[in-house]
Amino acid sequence: MTSSLTVEPRFRGPARSANGGYISGLLAEELRRRTGNPIATVTLRRPPPLGTELVVGAEENDPAGHTLHCRAGDLLVAEVTAGHLTGPAPGPVPYAVAAATAEGYGGLADHPFPTCFTCGPDRAPGDGLRLFPGPVPGRADTVATTWTPGSEVGVPIVWAALDCPGGWSVLTPGRPMVLGRMTAEVSATPLPHGEYVIVGHARGVDGRKAFTSTALYDHAGGLLARAEATWLVIDPDTINAG
C-alpha cells in the first residue's frame, strides 16, 4: 500500500526544499497510522522537494510496513522507521528566561535560510513559526525560545518546532547545517494560542556531524514532546539553488 503527500512551499526550510522537521513529522504520522509506533526515526537522504508529489510505501519484503520509504519518482528522499530516544530530554527553562533569550538569537544577524518555516526571521507572524532560540544564561550548549502556536497545531507542526531549536544549539557563523536524521516522540500536542517553551541542547560534534536534543514544555514545565537529531554541515548556496 502506498500513499502520497506534497509539501507546500510555505513549509520550506532552505529556499527550495522542505523544512526537515515538518516533512519528518508527516512521515512519522504515516508510520503511526500503519504500525502504531509512537516514536519514529526519519532519515533524510536528499533535500525534500517542494510542490512535488512524494510517494510513501513499504518494500515488497516488508508487508507490515516497519520501514517506509518516501520517493520523488525514482529518487529516495527519506526513510522512516520505529525509533527510540537515547538520552534524557534537556531540562525545562522558565518562560520569562526563554522569552529574554531572543535577543541573542544568532539567526537575526546571520541566517543561512532566512525564510525557514520554523526559525526564519523573514517570515511574517502567523505565516512561519518565528522561533528565535538564544543562549540560556548559566547553561552551556543550551538555547531556548518561547512558542505561542496559532490555530495549526498538529504533529508535523510540533516536529517542525522541535527541529530548528536543536540546530541553533550547534550552529555557528560560517558553519551552516541542515537536518539529517530526527527521532521524536509527541506525547501531547500544544493548545492553540497557549504559552510554551522549547529547549535545545548540543550533545556533541563529530567532524561535519552534530548531535542535538530538544524538548517542548508547557508553561508549568510539563514535558509534551522531545527529539534527538543529527545535523550535517552543508553549503547553503548549493542547497538553496535546489
Image: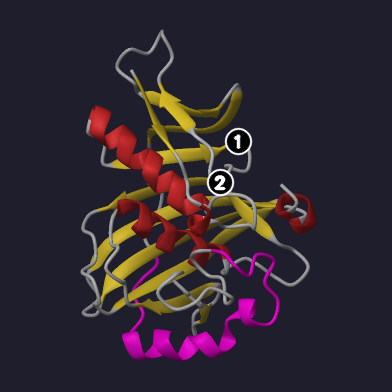
Q: Residue at x 45, y 91 (%)?
A: 100
Q: Estimate the x, y position of residue 9 in percent, counting from the top left.
A: 53, 54
- Residue type pointed to by label 1: Arg
Foreground mark, 2 or 1, reads: 2
Which quadrant is home to the N terminus? Answer: top left
SS of the residue at dot 1? loop
Q: Is residue 24 magenta?
A: no
Taking the magenta stretch, the answer to whether it contains residue 112 is: yes
> Which residue is located at x 26 percent, y 41 percent?
38
Where is 65 relative to 211, above or below?
Answer: above
Residue 118: where, in percent of width, then height?
Answer: 49, 65
The mark found on residue 50 in the picture is: 2
Label 2 SS: loop
Task: Please tell me whether residue 155 is drawn above or below residue 37 in the rendered image.
Answer: below
Q: Residue at x 26, y 68 (%)?
A: 151
Q: Which residues are magenta?
A: 90-116
